Image: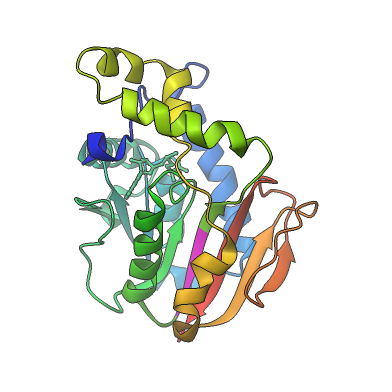
């Protein structure tokens, strides 16, 4: 499935960072986002957070210090093993479970089973249909009154080039021999990640009846709006990203 979606990741942390430094970036971001989104509090100790697209556990470590139970989900089963190793070193591994997203679109978790469903820099890397399916899965697994906090990338000028080149690169990853070589080049891997741009109406529209208190978080300079969502800004958000934060009915 990883090859079918064209998703590749050629190394652990990039060439510049040690794993410890990589995790430190998550340690900064997790409290910042949870605080801004109103998701930080003592009750978290008794709550569950599901992280969709946990990668190798960069943010998962910090989540295990905030939430009593954390379920890391990823398309790449190898990353789930790495997440255990990373959280074992830098987080509270006794609070961690993992769940393989074997088909790239379905979470193998029960309805109404988590308090928070969170996803960062993942839903832009899937096919649009998978990203929309995972969005509706996030709502399905969240308890009534629980929260979703999901990150997407909106369209910008450079996408005229980036999206077609990303699509070509993912196709090239499947060429026997050459694809394997190409997938190990970090530059190509990063291009291959450019998979979709969904606008907030596409994301919120199909799920609106299941949600309340819908907020669209963006960088202060971004012009993104959508589906009557309340606009909120935070300068820690990448200008081409946005977040949908909402309560599940
Ligand atoms: C850029 S990494 C981000 C990891 C983590 N959220 C972080 O901030 O460090 C994107 C992750 O999404 C995962 N991914 C890509 N497509 C996916 C899909 N369809 N379902 C689940 N995970 C997916 C990749 O395997 C990868 O671990």
Horizontal and vertical percent position of residue 199: 57, 59
Locate residue 8 relative to residue 230 in the image: left or right.
left
Name the quadrant where ligand 1 sits: top left
Image coords of residue 119 (percent x, y): 45, 55
Q: Residue at x 76, y 57 (%)?
A: 223
Task: Mark yes or no: residue 12 visible.
Answer: yes
- Vertical position of residue 90 compared to residue 187: above or below: below
**Residue visible at 34% across and 42% down in the picture:** 87
Q: Nearer the viewer, residue 232 or 93?
A: 232
The residue depicted at 40 percent of the width and 39 percent of the height is 90
User: How far from the left and from the top, in percent, is residue 221?
Assistant: 80, 51
Task: Please say if 100 is above or below 162.
Answer: below
**Quarter residue 47 falls in:** bottom left
To which quarter of the image does residue 182 belong? top left
The N terminus, quarter of image: top left
State how many labels appear. 0
Residue 22 point in image, percent of width and height: 49, 31
How is the protein colored in the picture?
rainbow
The one nearer the camera, 116 or 185, is 185
Residue 68 in sight here: no
Q: Is residue 239 left or right of residue 6?
A: right
Q: Extreme right residue here?
A: 221
Please state which of residues 103 and 27 is positioned toward the viewer in this rendering: 103
Q: Residue at x 21, y 13 (%)?
A: 177
Q: Report the quarter where the C terminus lies.
A: bottom left
**Quick one: 18 or 106, which is closer to the camera?**
106
Instruction: Specify the quadrant of the image occupied by residue 225.
Output: bottom right
From the image, give the main secondary structure of the stretch colored magenta: strand
Magenta includes 31? no
Q: From which residue to which does the magenta span run?
A: 146-150
């Amino acid at each position: 499935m990883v090859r079918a979606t064209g998703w590749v990741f050629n190394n652990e942390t990039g060439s510049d960072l040690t794993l410890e430094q990589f995790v430190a970036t998550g340690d900064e971001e997790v409290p910042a986002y949870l605080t801004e989104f109103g998701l930080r509090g003592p009750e978290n100790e008794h709550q569950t957070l599901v992280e969709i697209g946990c990668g190798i556990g960069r943010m998962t470590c910090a989540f295990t210090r905030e939430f009593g139970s954390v379920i890391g989900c990823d398309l790449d089963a190898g990353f789930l093993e790495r997440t255990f190793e990373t959280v074992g070193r830098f987080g509270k591994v006794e609070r961690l479970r993992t769940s393989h997203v074997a088909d790239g679109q379905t979470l193998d978790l029960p309805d109404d089973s988590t308090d928070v469903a969170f996803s960062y820099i993942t839903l832009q890397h899937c096919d649009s249909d998978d990203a929309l399916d995972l969005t509706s899965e996030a709502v399905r697994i969240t308890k009534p009154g629980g929260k979703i906090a999901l990150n997407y990338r909106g369209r910008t000028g450079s996408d005229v080039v980036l999206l077609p080149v990303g699509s070509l690169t993912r196709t090239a990853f499947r060429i026997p021999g050459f694809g394997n070589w190409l997938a190990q080049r970090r530059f190509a891997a990063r291009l291959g990640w450019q998979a979709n741009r969904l606008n907030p109406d596409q994301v919120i529209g199909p799920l609106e009846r299941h949600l309340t208190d819908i907020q669209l978080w963006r960088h202060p300079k971004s012009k993104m709006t959508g589906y009557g969502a309340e606009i909120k800004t935070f300068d820690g958000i990448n200008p081409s990203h946005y977040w949908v934060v909402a309560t599940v009915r």
